[in-house]
Image (spheres, rainbow, N blue to C red):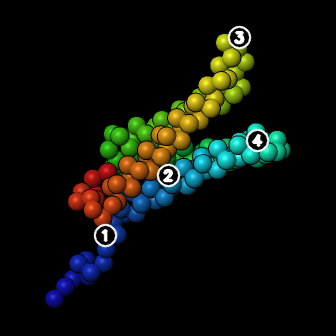
Amino acid sequence: MTTSSEIEPDRTPTRVILISFYVTSIIFNVCLIAQLLTVGVAYFNNPAWWNIHVWFVRGYSGLSLVLLGWSLIAPFSRRIRNLAASLPVLLGLQFSSIHLKSPLHLEILHPLIGFTLLYVSSSLVHSLGRTFSPTNNHNHQI
């Protein structure tokens, strides 16, 4: 005779938290990709898209703080925590670099920081994805 725990998949609160974190990190990553596309449209096609670019980042940037807080309270590896902590730092640098006016023209770092942000966010998604992969024998070690 099988018990209900053998039939039902693992539905512990921790697993739900981990999957929710993963989904939130995917949403953040998709927002960054959309952000990159809006700036491209603004630059190459229609400058009116710049306003969409600005309002879009203001809309989703709070997710970086949510991911940071979540990574500190959930059982994540140091790598996941470091990646999550990098997101608000890089976003802060993004905001600073575009508004910073100096003789050194540090605003040229804005696109570089943006691509770094996309790389870190994608690394976070991929790191989390590998832990949930069916081929991973250590599904509960994030």
The tag earlier along the polypeptide, 3 or 4, is 4
Whole-angstrom CA distance, mark 2 to mark 3, is 37 Å
State yes or no: discs 2 and 3 in contact (Cβ < 8 Å).
Answer: no
Q: Is residue 51 visible?
A: no
Q: Amino acid at mark 2?
A: Ser
Identify the residue position indicated by label 1 in the image.
10
**Residue 21 located left or right of residue 45:** left
Q: Secondary structure at mark 2?
A: helix
Callout in the foreground (4, 2): 4
Q: Secondary structure at mark 3?
A: loop
Q: Amino acid at mark 1?
A: Asp
Counting from the top left corner in percent of width and height, residue 22 is at 44, 56
Question: Count the marks: how many?
Answer: 4
* In the image, residue 69 above or below residue 113: below
The tag earlier along the polypeptide, 1 or 2, is 1
Rendered image: mark on residue 44: 4
**Residue 58 located left or right of residue 141:** right
Counting from the top left corner in percent of width and height, residue 74 is at 38, 50
Rendered image: mark on residue 25: 2
**Residue 54 located left or right of residue 20:** right
Whole-angstrom CA distance, mark 4 to mark 1, is 49 Å
Rendered image: mark on residue 121: none
Q: Amino acid at mark 4?
A: Phe
Q: Residues within 10 Å of mark 3 (few under 14, many from 20)?
A: few
The tag earlier along the polypeptide, 4 or 2, is 2
The tag earlier along the polypeptide, 4 or 1, is 1
| Residue in view at x 33 percent, y 55 percent | 131
Q: Secondary structure at mark 4?
A: helix
* In the image, residue 87 above or below residue 21: above
